[in-house]
Image (spheres, rainbow, N blue to C red):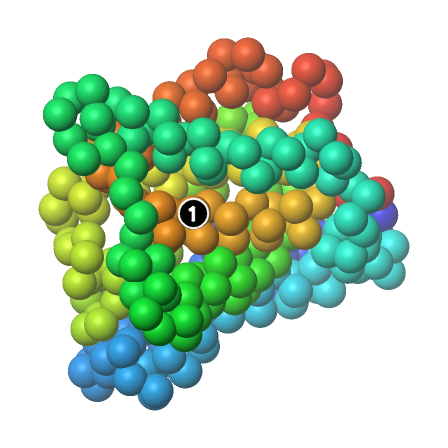
């Protein structure tokens, strides 16, 4: 695959395919929108707030698609879209993994909570409200669909491949996980957002959330490298994680540590180099 080696940015020659350039552009798009929302006092529970939230979420996908067309030739661009369309890349076995992992993590976290005299696993508020008002399920469906699509076209659709060219799968996952976690920061200061109203900034929940995202990044790479770099598979996994965590509640103090434990198990069993039994990771053609 031919790649665009470099372009002039200001007076400095910068390799356009460098993932840090992608991260900078992604942050610029999302943070500009979200910081504007903070300054204007926009509430995410309003109609204009929903629009602003969507505009912010576009950051990773807009940058991802843009960099795919800047960096790769026609073959690479076709590969990107094929990874979204081709269901066969995932395989039946990994479909089961994708569907079971979030449920198993939640159940294990709930059992640990119950054994320590906590409530264990309970139905989320959205499920309880849906029994009275079927439309109450819409927020959960929103979280399970649009954010994963708009994020994963960039995070795993573009950035992960670029990172794995120079780093081990584990190192690439940790770098991407930290960047992915930091990308959420403005959300903790916007009225009506889950991050501000439920989690809160610099709370125990905040740090658990941030660490949990890094652990999720490792698990996502493990799946991604086993399913022929399928973006569709990762969108489904991301969406399913969101849906399960929204409809089935368990204490964060147990939920996120179980994801961390799973990440350690993945690294221990499959190895940090590729998070697979192979010596090399799948790469763009």
Mark 1: give few (<14), some (14-19) or many (20+) Cα within 10 Å.
Answer: some
Q: Position of residue 49 (x, y in %)?
A: 32, 81
For residue 89, which quarter of the picture? Answer: top right
Q: Is residue 179 visible?
A: no
In the image, is residue 98 above or below residue 235?
above
Farthest top residue?
269
Name the spot of residue 126 as percent of width and height, x first. Answer: 32, 61
- Judging depth in this view, the residue of 143 and 22 nearest the camera is 143
> Which residue is depicted at the point 46% across and 37% down?
102
Q: Is residue 83 left or right of residue 29?
A: right
Numbered marks: total: 1
Judging depth in this view, the residue of 65 and 194 nearest the camera is 194
Q: Is residue 237 above or below residue 281?
A: below
Q: Which percent across, then down, holds residue 283?
A: 75, 37
Which quadrant of the structure image shows residue 274? Answer: top right
| Quarter of the picture holding the C terminus | top right
Q: Residue at x 30, y 52 (%)?
A: 124
For residue 14, side relative to residue 175 (left or right): right
Residue visible at 26% across and 23% down in the picture: 112
Q: Is residue 222 above or below residue 95?
A: above
**In the image: residue 228, left or right of residue 65:** right
Residue 267 % position (x, y): 50, 18
Residue 191 appears anywhere in the view = yes
Residue at 42% over, 19% down: 264
Label 1, on which residue?
A: 244
Residue closer to the observer: 181 or 230: 230
Asked which secondary structure carries label 1, the reply is: helix
């Amino acid at each position: 695959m031919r790649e665009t080696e470099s372009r002039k940015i200001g007076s400095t020659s910068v390799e356009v395919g460098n993932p840090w350039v992608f991260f900078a552009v992604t942050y610029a798009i999302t943070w500009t929108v979200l910081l504007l929302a903070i300054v204007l006092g926009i509430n995410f529970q309003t109609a204009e707030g929903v629009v602003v939230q969507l505009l912010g979420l576009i950051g990773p996908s807009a940058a991802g698609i843009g960099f795919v067309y800047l960096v790769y030739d026609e073959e690479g661009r076709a590969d990107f879209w094929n990874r979204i369309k081709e269901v066969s890349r995932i395989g039946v076995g990994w479909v089961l993994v994708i569907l079971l992992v979030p449920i198993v993590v939640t159940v294990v976290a709930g059992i640990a909570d119950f054994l320590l005299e906590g409530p264990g696993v309970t139905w989320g508020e959205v499920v309880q409200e849906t029994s009275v008002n079927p439309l109450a399920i819409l927020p959960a469906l929103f979280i399970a669909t649009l954010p994963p699509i708009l994020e994963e076209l960039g995070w795993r659709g573009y950035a992960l491949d670029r990172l794995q060219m120079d780093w081990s799968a584990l190192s690439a996952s940790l770098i991407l996980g930290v960047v992915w976690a930091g990308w959420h920061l403005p959300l903790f200061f916007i009225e009506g957002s889950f991050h501000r109203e439920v989690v809160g900034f610099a709370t125990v929940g905040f740090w658990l959330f941030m660490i949990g995202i890094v652990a999720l990044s490792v698990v996502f790479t493990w799946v991604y490298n086993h399913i022929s770099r399928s973006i569709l598979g990762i969108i489904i996994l991301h969406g399913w994680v969101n849906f399960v965590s929204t409809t089935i509640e368990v204490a964060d103090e147990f939920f996120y540590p179980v994801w961390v434990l799973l990440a350690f198990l993945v690294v221990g069993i499959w190895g940090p180099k590729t998070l697979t039994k192979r010596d090399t990771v799948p790469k763009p053609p």
